Image (tube, rainbow, N blue to C red):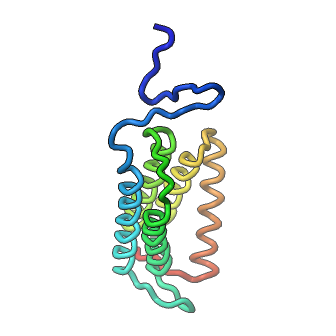
Amino acid sequence: MENAHTPSDPLMDGDQAVPVTLPGHSVLKPLGAAVLAILGVGAAVWAITFDVGSLDRPGAGLWPVTLGSALAVSAVVFLLFNRDGKEGAFGREQIDALIAIASIVAFIVLFQHVHFVAGALVLMAGCQVAAGARKPLSIAVTCVLATAAAWVLFFVILGVSTPL
């Protein structure tokens, strides 16, 4: 059968691709927002266990608390105001989001148990893959340069102390 398609393939309607949606997709946005909110709250709560410090003397937990809180607030805003009703099929965009979330979780675990550098390298690589980067050499170079820049910014210029 040449004209058969899988449920994840879009149906063609003239020149427009019409994505095939499966039952239950109306829960993807709230579920995604809930996962991001939980991740943000979890990161903020975890980071409070470190010395947060203040803006003029930041501790190791200040920026993770700030970013975790921003992630949680963004998820709530998304949930409240994104009511366009466009629910798509599970595809590459959702896989990329899962890769980004997994790299954030890996960063947290590696930062806490190994070192900032290992966590930052994994975070940078995961986010690049989620953003569509596919060339290993380009990803590696960008990871090293971005991690070095983050190290200089946080630990040299801002004087943030690490929990290790």
The one of 154 and 9 positioned closer to us in this rendering = 9
- Point 63% across, 39% down: residue: 135
What residue appears at the point 46 percent right and 89 percent down from the top-left corner?
53
List x then y, in percent, for residue 151. Answer: 59, 70
Q: State the residue in front, 29 or 140.
A: 29
Determine the residue positioned at 60% across, 68% down. Answer: 150
Position of 93 with respect to 47 (left or right) is: right
Query: Which corner quadrant holds the N terminus?
Result: top left
Residue 44 picture quarter = bottom left
In this picture, is 154 found above or below 37?
below
Q: Position of residue 99 (x, y in %)?
A: 46, 48
Q: Position of residue 32 (x, y in %)?
A: 40, 55
* The C terminus lies in quadrant: bottom left
At x 47%, y 84%, the residue is: 59
Query: x%, y% of residue 67?
Result: 49, 72
Q: Is residue 8 above or below residue 85?
A: above
Q: Is residue 78 left or right of residue 26?
A: right
Q: Please identify the quarter of the rendering in which residue 101 is found.
A: bottom left
**Left or right placement of residue 97 versus residue 157 in this view:** left
Q: How many numbered circles does the render carry?
A: 0
